Amino acid sequence: RLPMLRTSAGRAYLAACPTRERDLIVSHLRRIDEADDRPFLDEGRLTQMIAETQARGYAVRSEGEYNPKTASIAVPIVRKGAVYGCISIIWIRSALGIEEAMAQFVGQLQETASAIPVEP
């Protein structure tokens, strides 16, 4: 099970999906009440994360959430308002800084996501 709030792929999906779908997912996460998700379900923090991710067009996990030894970035695959999936890259934090990784890989991830054929 993918931790939606603690991974870049989950964050990218949530930020790109329609509001109704996002609300259903967040309601489900609140119902299952996983202890590790609670800080991320704070309304202010959740709203900020979604807004920042939408503004950037990709999601970031750099603070050691989920796995403190790794960081990641993810780009959603979106067609006509529907999210079909996400592409992410995960790396060892001590090997590559987040700023360097974003500069090096975000453009390539976005190009790849745009080029993936999706069945209607």
Image: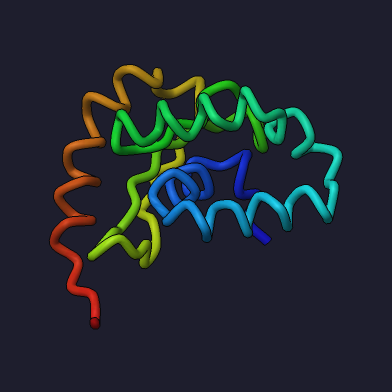
| Relative depth, front residue between 61 and 53 | 53
Tell me the colour scheme of the image.
rainbow
Q: From the viewer's perspective, is residue 13 above or below residue 81?
A: above
Q: Is residue 33 left or right of residue 11?
A: right
Give the total of numbered labels: 0
Q: From the viewer's perspective, is residue 60 above or below residue 75?
A: above
Indicate the quadrant containing the N terminus: top left, top right, bottom left or bottom right: bottom right
Indicate the quadrant containing the C terminus: top left, top right, bottom left or bottom right: bottom left
Q: Which residue sits at x=52%, y=58%?
A: 20
Q: Name the image quarter holding residue 81.
A: bottom left
Find residue 58 and report its horizontal and vertical position in percent: 34, 38
Q: Name the image quarter holding residue 103.
A: top left
Q: Name the image quarter holding residue 113.
A: bottom left
| Relative depth, front residue between 100 and 74 | 74
Find residue 49 and report its horizontal and vertical position in percent: 51, 29
Find residue 96 and report its horizontal and vertical position in percent: 39, 22
Find residue 75 and report its horizontal and vertical position in percent: 33, 46
Q: From the viewer's perspective, is residue 30 above or below residue 1?
A: above
Q: Is residue 59 left or right of residue 111?
A: right
Q: Which residue sits at x=29%, y=27%?
A: 102
